[in-house]
Amino acid sequence: AAAAANDGIKRHDLRGVVTNVYADRSALLVRHEEIPGFMKPMTMLFKVDAATLQAARKGQTITARMSRQGNDWVLEDVKVVAQP
């Protein structure tokens, strides 16, 4: 995590709901809340690592760190929020 913090990539905290899992694209479709001062609420495709892709399920509420890396939007440090 320390290396990630020093790589020059700007990251933003995100909270949203997984609306679809695209294993063939290593990506999740996420409907996220507003990111104050950066982005309005919307549904976006995010690249994720293999472990996150394996664990992700449609309908999960998640928190994560989002960033733009090259042409891709990426989610890191994805955590499932406990459902009430």
Image (cartoon, grey):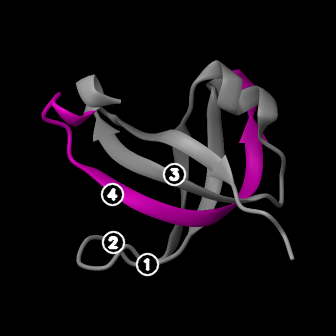
**Percent x, y for residue 62?**
65, 58
> Which span of residues is magenta-colored?
5-24
Task: Assess whether residue 21 is covered by the magenta stretch.
Answer: yes
Question: Is residue 70 visible to us here?
Answer: no
Crowd class of label 2 (few under 14; some 14 to 19; many from 20; radius 10 Å): few
Quadrant (top left/top right/bottom left/bottom right) for the C terminus: bottom right
Q: Which residue is mark 4?
A: 12
> Of residues 51 and 38, which is closer to you in this image?
51
Label annotation for residue 34? 1
Q: Pointers 4 and 2 in contact (CB under 8 A)? A: yes
Name above or below for residue 22 compared with residue 13: above
Q: Residue at x 65, y 20 (%)?
A: 50
Q: Residue at x 65, y 43 (%)?
A: 28
Q: Pointers 1 and 2 in contact (CB under 8 A)? A: yes
**18 horizontally vs 16: left or right:** right
Which label sits in the foreground, 4 or 2? 4
